[in-house]
Image (cartoon, grey):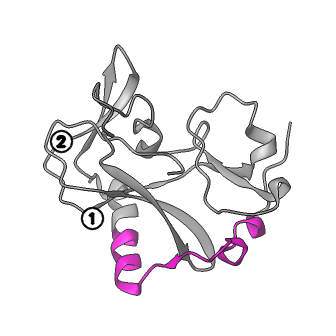
Amino acid sequence: MNHMAPRCSNQERFEKGGIQVLHKEVKEIMEVCSTMPQRGQCPPLLVVFDSRFSFTVQADANIKDMTFTAEFVGDVDYFENREKGDCDNLMTPLLITDPSQRLVICPNKCGNISGFMSGINDHTPDGKKKQNVKCVSYDIDGESHVLLVAYRDIACGEKLYCDYNG
């Protein structure tokens, strides 16, 4: 069994070009959101089975543009330990030049609703992207975190599509 990447590997200072710092007010909102399940609350998202694509996420209410929907969470490991694994939605939290130090977030064993957002089949028949959620890396207390944010207004019942590592 491979060992996980040490926590000190996920530091914003390793990002080529740097990453955005999460403002104090937004960090406070994110902390409130992360404790919602403990209070029996959740964002307006549903995990729904689709016979063509397996499990997907859809909006259970209208979601406004630039709304925080979830943090992409999971085990953080080196890419080389996971590239031949069974996880099909790896997320890269940092753009690191040294390939041996590249990290990925793998939600197979521990994750949340973000692991069900569709990153495949994300084009319409005419070639347009269906993407309505974007992944943004933020520096939170010196570590890189990937937040999923509504890229445009999302209607109730609409599937959420994100461009993993886009």
Question: Residue 53: horizontal and vertical position, in percent?
Answer: 39, 21
Task: Based on the picture, tell me whether residue 17 belongs to the magenta stretch.
Answer: yes
Q: Residues within 10 Å of mark 2 (few under 14, many from 20)?
A: some
Question: Residue 92: horizontal and vertical position, in percent?
Answer: 62, 53
Compare marks 1 and 2 and give the one earlier in the sequence.
2
Question: Residue 156: horizontal and vertical position, in percent?
Answer: 13, 42
Q: Is residue 85 above or below residue 136?
A: above
Front residue (pair 24, 130): 130
Q: Is residue 144 above or below residue 112?
A: below
Compared across the picture, whether 128 is left or right of 109 comes to left
Q: Residue 34: which numbered mark, if any? A: none
Residue farthest toward the front in the current orientation of the protein? 126
- SS of the residue at dot 2? loop
Q: Residue 66: which numbered mark, if any? A: 1
- Residue under label 2, please give it: 60
Kind of residue indicated by mark 2 = Asp
Q: Residue at position x 29%, y 48% from top? A: 132
- SS of the residue at dot 1? loop
Please state, as top left, top right, bottom left or bottom right, where the N terminus lies in the image: top right
The region drawn magenta spans 7-32
Q: Give the Cα separation between the discs numbered 1 and 2.
A: 17 Å
